[in-house]
Image (cartoon, grey):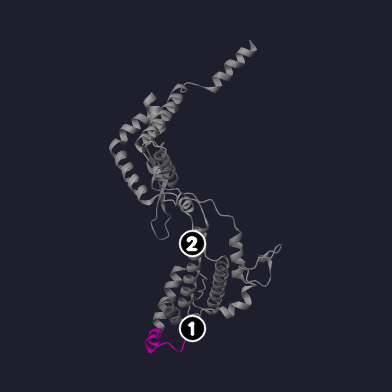
Amino acid sequence: MIMEAEGSMGGSSVPSSPQLGASTLLRRAVSATTANVVRQQMGDLEEPGFVYQPMFGEDVRSKVNQLVRLLSQAWQALDIERQVHGPQESVSWWGRLGTFLGAWGPQDEALELRRTLSYLQSATNDLCHLFKLQLPSISSLGSTTLDCPLTRSEPGRDVADSRDLSFLQRSVQRVARQRPCNVGYQGNPDTQPIRSYEITFLVRILHALSCYLNDKYGPVMQALYQGDSFSGHLARQLLCPPTTYQRVTKTGGDRAPVRETIRLPPRVCLRPLAQKQGLGFLGFLLFFAYTWGYSPLLVAFLGLVWFALLTFARATVSWGLRGFSWSSVSSSLREHLHS
């Protein structure tokens, strides 16, 4: 549709091909009235003095062709790296267990390399299909692959400052040198995206259980959390503190999104129980306990008792120091020294 609209406006942005059928030629033969309507609509949407740059013009096609060559060169460089390193040796049982617990190993690097090759190939094919370009062959890339900034690694030379690089190549190098920005999740902290170190189905189950407990016992937990008694200090050790977050609602069009501040009361959050590291440590503990002749149920019970004692100890310390102030202690010491 975009190519037909640009052709109706009288531009030469549509590439001519002898393989086009008669139906396609007829569809391009749009009347002058339709072309004027398209120009009028564009004039209403854009500011005065706007000059339309055809999406399928020769300038854009030339830049896309350079981008396709860069993608092909990057694919060839990564494919050579994959062939040089060769298939990884079989990972041992301990290595697989470490990968399960969140460690990064050669198997993950090989998987990411295969994914990158697949994404580069898909992007190249889609761009060539959209802009009616020919896929660059390996022979055409052979003379320029070694000089490509994606595969060249000469020490002491800034590739971005070289004059023989195109605009696209300099843009790629500029983006590659940029520091990663500090991206943080600003939505509901209880519904954050599932991380790689978490078990997916456990996160969903524990979140549903947490929502059920919060809906049923929410007022009771809020009253306990705000109390100054020992039970209040104990509740502060177990419940998540109240927090606020910004909920953004996109309205569409030119209007700015609506931002609403949402306050979350004290609540139960069982999501940390779905982390692979904690479950792996618990599995190791039960396994070694069973190896040494102890019952796994006994070990689990002792673990719960240890957690309860630790929670009670922290609540006791917090409750005992509720009236404690370092300023009063320093002032009393100062008076004692002066006297």
What segment is highlighted magenta in the picture? 17-30
Give the image quarter of residue 166.
Answer: bottom right
Is residue 306 visible from the viewing direction of this image?
A: yes
Instruction: Report the disc number at residue 111.
Output: 2
Judging depth in this view, the residue of 70 and 226 nearest the camera is 70
Q: Residue at x 64, y 12 (%)?
A: 338
Q: CA distance from mark 1 to mark 2?
A: 39 Å
In percent of width and height, residue 87 lies at: 52, 65
SS at mark 1 in the image: loop
Instruction: Report the disc number at residue 15.
Output: 1
Badge 1: residue crowd in 10 Å (few <14, some 14–19, many ≥20)? few
In percent of width and height, residue 248 lies at: 41, 51
Magenta residue check for 13: no
Is residue 47 visible from the viewing direction of this image?
A: no
Q: Residue at x 31, y 43 (%)?
A: 209
Closer to the chain start, of discs 1 and 2, is 1
Which amino acid, mark 2? Leu
Mark 1 near mark 2, Cβ–Cβ under 8 Å? no
Judging depth in this view, the residue of 124 and 314 nearest the camera is 314
Give the image quarter of residue 337.
Answer: top right
Judging depth in this view, the residue of 68 and 163 nearest the camera is 68
SS at mark 2 in the image: helix
